[in-house]
């Protein structure tokens, strides 16, 4: 089911629904546009949309011009305070924006034109140049007090956020090439996982300074590691995606090989993996040259239950909307936002089954 689509001014590479309860209808999208010439530049933007699946409606309501952005992430829900949106950009900066709306947020508003003036939405509260290299990826720790940043020179940086002040706590050379994945373990936030174009997949313990290497696997991924995410429902299960087109399932207690080879070839290169907000084992994957896939993991079985191929170029950004929507008298959960790079297309859609709850 199509909820809405639009073409954006710039090349979109990430989409993120806000996980905070009062702002679940807010969708952020980021863009990266290379201006070629004698003095090439990398420009970008953050776009905020109102997404209402029951209307249906996809409407742009705010835009911020920035440097070219590689990744954005909202602060985790349930951490209190206003939602924060962090960006990793091509100028080597980590920037944090605060979403400022009236206290009832968007969830209780029926008409978008009742919202405050445009300038009252996304405000930068902090910015720090992490490196002269480009910031390629980021992740929040569960308490929203630290952010991990992967850099184009292979370094990994850990940055604290206290009272709107960013402070670089640690930085070390973690990989030989570009570092595309740097994610906290949501069950053990003292651990950070990293993945790189050097095909290595690593885990680091932040309790040591410099951080101690817990493990490193350099044999399984045949090409660069693009994304790493821990299972929210199982503290022992972790997933990786790679340019080699495989989604792999790992048990962190035995990291020498994937769980009973429970891996699935999704084609195109697995750039991003997102867990369903509350259905264990249901994953959304952005597969670069092969559109998007929804995968169900049950024990040792991995199965693609739906694919989405209505984009015409690199499939980079994907996310689930939190919460449920009432359609045809049933409560359903399965609203998805996706974006593709060169055709500058953003789409919001719902699983064919609708996942009746």
Image (tube, rainbow, N blue to C red):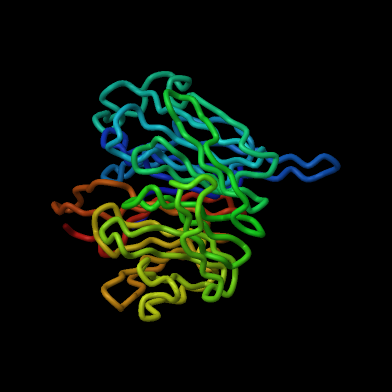
Question: Which of the image's four quarters has the C terminus?
Answer: bottom left
Q: Nearer the viewer, residue 337 or 177?
A: 177
Q: Residue at x 54, y 47 (%)?
A: 210
Q: Residue furthest front?
A: 208
Question: Which of the image's four quarters has the N terminus?
Answer: bottom left
Q: Residue at x 29, y 46 (%)?
A: 322
Tally of numbered tags: 0
Image position of 105 (left or right of 13)? left
The answer to whether residue 2 is above or below residue 132 is below
**In the rendered image, is residue 88 in sight?**
yes
Q: Residue furthest right?
A: 38
Task: From the top left corner, tell me how far across and down residue 217 is, in percent.
Answer: 51, 69
Task: From the top left corner, tell me how far across and down residue 216 is, in percent.
Answer: 51, 65
Q: Nearer the viewer, residue 180 or 203?
A: 203
Q: Residue furthest bottom?
A: 260
Image position of 308 (left or right of 33)? left
Image position of 235 (left or right of 182)? left
Q: Residue at x 52, y 26 (%)?
A: 126
Task: From the top left corner, tell me how far across and down residue 158 is, in percent.
Answer: 51, 42
The answer to whether residue 96 is above or below residue 352 is above
**In the rendered image, is residue 311 in sight?**
no
Q: Nearer the viewer, residue 217 or 83?
A: 217
Task: From the top left corner, tell me how far across and down residue 122 is, in percent.
Answer: 46, 27
Q: Quadrant of residue 295?
A: bottom left
The answer to whether residue 212 is above or below residue 89 is below
């Amino acid at each position: 089911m199509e909820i809405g689509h639009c073409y954006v001014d710039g090349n979109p590479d990430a989409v993120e629904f806000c996980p905070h309860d009062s702002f679940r209808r807010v969708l952020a999208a980021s863009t990266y546009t290379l201006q070629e010439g004698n003095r090439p530049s990398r420009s970008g933007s953050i776009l905020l949309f109102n997404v209402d699946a029951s209307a249906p409606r996809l409407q742009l309501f705010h835009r911020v011009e920035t440097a070219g952005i590689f990744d954005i992430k909202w602060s985790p829900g349930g951490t209190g305070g206003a939602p924060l949106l962090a960006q990793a950009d091509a100028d080597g900066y980590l920037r944090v924006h605060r979403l400022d709306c009236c206290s009832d947020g968007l969830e209780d508003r029926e008409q978008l034109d009742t919202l405050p003036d445009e300038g009252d939405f996304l405000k930068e509260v902090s910015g720090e140049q992490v490196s002269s290299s480009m910031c390629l990826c980021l992740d929040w720790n569960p308490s929203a007090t630290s952010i991990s940043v992967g850099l184009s020179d292979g370094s990994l940086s850990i940055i604290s956020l206290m009272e709107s002040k960013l402070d670089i706590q640690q930085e070390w050379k973690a990989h030989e090439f570009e570092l595309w994945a740097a994610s906290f373990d949501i069950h053990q936030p003292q651990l950070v996982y990293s993945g790189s174009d050097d095909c290595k997949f690593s885990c680091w313990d932040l309790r040591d300074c410099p951080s101690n290497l817990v493990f490193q696997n350099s044999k399984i991924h045949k090409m660069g590691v693009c994304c790493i995410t821990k299972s929210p429902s199982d503290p022992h299960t972790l997933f990786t995606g790679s340019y080699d087109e495989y989604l792999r399932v790992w048990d962190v207690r035995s990291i020498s090989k994937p769980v009973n080879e429970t891996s699935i070839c999704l084609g195109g290169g697995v750039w991003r993996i997102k867990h369903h907000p509350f259905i264990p084992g249901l994953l959304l994957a952005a597969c670069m040259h092969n559109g998007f896939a929804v995968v169900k993991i049950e024990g040792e079985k991995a199965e693609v239950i739906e694919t989405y191929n209505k984009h015409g170029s690199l499939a980079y950004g994907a996310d689930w909307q939190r919460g449920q929507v009432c359609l045809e008298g049933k409560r359903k959960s399965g609203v998805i936002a996706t974006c593709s790079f060169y055709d500058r297309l953003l789409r919001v859609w719902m699983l064919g089954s609708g996942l009746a709850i």
